[in-house]
Amino acid sequence: QVQLAESGGGLVQSGESLRLSCTANVTLLGIYTMGWYRQAPGKQRELVAAIAGGGSTDYGESVKGRFTISRDNAQRTVYLQMNSLKPEDTASYYCNCRRIDGVQWWGEGTLVTVSS
């Protein structure tokens, strides 16, 4: 059973930056793809960014060029650096761990609020 703990959310102004962290209770082996998703009130959960075990990354269109995902396998942690934040980035952000066989786990989420 993988457990994920997110941190780093908060209230910022438009244009500022935040870094989210997600720490797992297991070693982040290459069989795990780690990702960040977000869900705003009244909207579906959407992919923000993902990083595979080999380091390849994928980003949602709305965050490309502003957000960067990285992983530190030794620290069992995945980071999401968010720059040039916009009010539309306001959402609860969830860490996701997906094993190569499709089994996945979710964190409880951390709230990011961007004021204009």
Image (cartoon, rainbow, N blue to C red):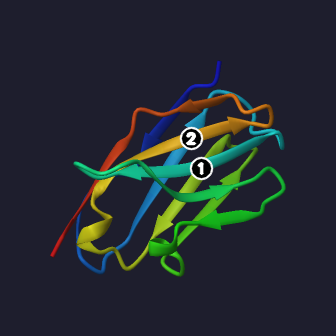
| Above/below status of 25 relative to 70 | above
- At x 57% / y 26%, what residue is drawn? 3
Image quadrant holding the N terminus, namely top right
Give whichever of 75, 24 is nearer the camera.
Answer: 24
In the image: residue 18, left or right of residue 25 = left
Q: Which mark is residue 96?
A: 2
Marks 2 and 1, Cα distance to the nearest angstrom? 5 Å
- At x 63% / y 24%, what residue is drawn? 2
| Above/below status of 19 relative to 8 | below
Q: Which residue is tagged 1?
A: 35
Tell me if label 2 and label 1 are in contact, CB under 8 Å.
Answer: yes
Q: Position of residue 78 (x, y in %)?
A: 61, 50
**Is disc 1 surrounded by few (<14), some (14 to 19) or many (20+) residues within 10 Å?**
many
Q: Quadrant of residue 31?
A: top right
Type of amino acid under label 1: Gly
Q: Quadrant of residue 112?
A: bottom left
What kind of element bears circle 2? strand
Q: Position of residue 101 (x, y in %)?
A: 79, 31
- At x 70% / y 51%, what residue is drawn? 72
